[in-house]
Amino acid sequence: MLNLLSNRKGLSGVEFVISIVIISLMVIVLYDILRETTNTYKYQDVQTNVVQQSRTAMEKMAREIRQADISTITITTLDANRDRIDFSAPLELENPDDLQTVRYEPQLNGDLQRTVAYAAGGSATNVVATYIKKLYFSSEYEGGIAIRMQVVNSSQTVNLPTKVFPRNKPQQ
């Protein structure tokens, strides 16, 4: 009898089923780990893109306000979380006398719209950022404009403050 057991080759049916079940469980666990890792990466990538887009919009806004004719800057409170800013600025450095009217206005859906009314006629509107929860503009001492933007995407909240000093003096 001892000789029969030692000469056995291969697996019995029960051993085969048990090994298939164990391998299946290992594959399921590894698949779940891989899926969660991929979802986390995608989520972080979206979060990073939203914040980067908001920072880019803030930098563009600050750069344009820096070029503004200070006498044309108008800040309008839309509600408790949103302000709109309008100003005139030369958007092309080659022609500093060609002033465009620019408006940054946060929408209720979280989009930040930028509208440019061209001196030659016509206008263009585009969305420069999304997930904007709050946007405030305020006049500061010595002619500066404070900008505070809050971006909220899922569970992440990012506050982006800056202060801008318009370069252009009022036209007379």
Image (cartoon, helix red, strand yellow):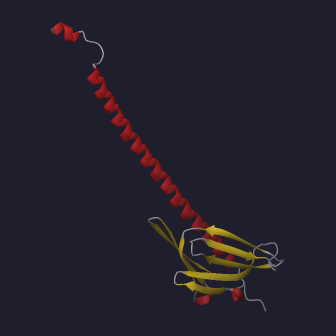
Q: Quadrant of residue 30?
A: top left
Residue 156 coordinates in the image, percent (x, y): 46, 66
Please, is residue 136 above or below residue 14 in the view?
below
Determine if residue 54 is in view.
yes
Residue drawn at (60%, 83%) of the image: 145
Number of numbered discs: 0
Q: Quadrant of the C terminus?
A: bottom right
Residue 133 coordinates in the image, percent (x, y): 52, 74
Q: Is residue 7 left or right of residue 166?
A: left
Q: Residue furthest left?
A: 1
Q: Is residue 72 left or right of residue 52?
A: right
Please, is residue 93 above or below residue 72 in the view?
above
Q: Residue furthest right?
A: 120
Residue drawn at (48%, 51%) of the image: 41
Q: Is residue 85 left or right of residue 117?
A: left
Residue drawn at (55%, 84%) of the image: 79
Q: Quadrant of the N terminus?
A: top left
Residue in front for this viewpoint, 89 or 117 = 117
Residue drawn at (65%, 77%) of the image: 104
Q: Quadrant of residue 132?
A: bottom right
Q: Residue furthest bottom?
A: 172
Please, is residue 79 above or below residue 59 in the view?
below
Residue in front for this viewpoint, 73 or 19 = 19
Residue 151 coordinates in the image, percent (x, y): 52, 70
Determine if residue 166 is in view.
no
Residue 35 coordinates in the image, percent (x, y): 44, 46
